[in-house]
Amino acid sequence: MNYIIENNIDFYSELQKELSKDSNQKIHDDQVIPDNLDNICLLSNSVLEKNYVTLECGHKFNYVPLYNEICNQKRENRLEITHLLINQIKCPYCRSITNKLLPYIDDKDVIKKKGINYPLKYCMKLHSCQWVKSGKNKDQELCGKSAFESDYGKYCCYHHKLSKNKNHHKEKLTNIQLNWSKEHERINKKYNLNQLREILRENKSKYKLKITGNKNEIIDRIIQCGLVIE
């Protein structure tokens, strides 16, 4: 039915056009279209994070979603036509085979699993370890082993652990300095390092105390354990 109002304008037709525009605009506004699909994880649809993985087919995934997917792939499935070898994983997007396992990374949601991120000889390489070797004639040579990125830098598993412990020790010393009290200072002035270590040895079996550490650490340990010394 047409409703001609004036100047030969079909009011009903014009109304339908406007409603159609509004509907199309709403659909467009509701769609979340990433500016760059190359920076999106194809499993979680979230932005790629550090340690994202690029498979041989070129598809990219954040590590943990892909790790969980590969764990599911490697479970026995009698309906699966393509059986993966120990060194193979399948792209969850295009189903093509990558002949490398995931690298292992230190993450609370990740453990070493054979055929997924272990053994090392079958794993792909994300980064090169940036740890500078020490000793004579090293000349700032980097470790270079397969590495992952963390808050401490890009290191292999071994040097990541060293870096992590080193940073934790720095934080511990900083906290001791921030909480340094009059009692800390009294003990510091009255006893030397060997005397303080002897106090710890006398109470080692009772409190399972460490004897190692610098003077400030040992003083703080004595106070934290409630050891009374005059």
Image (cartoon, grey):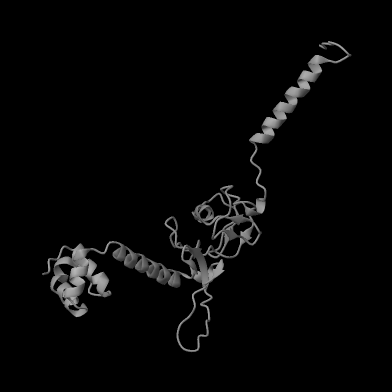
Residue furthest out toward the left: 230
Q: Quadrant of the N terminus?
A: top right
Look at the picture and state if 140 lies above or below 229: below
User: Measured along the vertical axis of the image, is residue 156 above or below residue 39?
Assistant: below
Q: Could you tell me which residue is drawn at 67 percent across and 48 percent down?
A: 35
Q: Residue at x 75, y 23 (%)?
A: 18
Q: Position of residue 95 (x, y in %)?
A: 63, 53
In the depicted view, which residue is nearer to us: 207 or 52?
207
Give above or below for 22 relative to 200: above
Relative image position of residue 163 (x, y in whole percent): 42, 70
Residue that appears at 53% across and 51% down: 78
Image x and y of residue 98, in percent: 61, 62
> Is residue 108 shown left or right of residue 22?
left
- Give the side of residue 103 with respect to residue 201, left or right: right
The image quadrant of residue 107 is bottom left
Residue 156 position, x and y percent, is 48, 70
Image quadrant where one finds the C terminus: bottom left
Q: Residue 50 or 157: which is nearer the viewer?
A: 50
Total labels: the figure holds 0
Displayed quadrant of residue 200: bottom left
User: In the current view of this chain or complex, which residue is farthest to the bottom?
Assistant: 137
Residue 67 or residue 88, whichever sits in front: 67
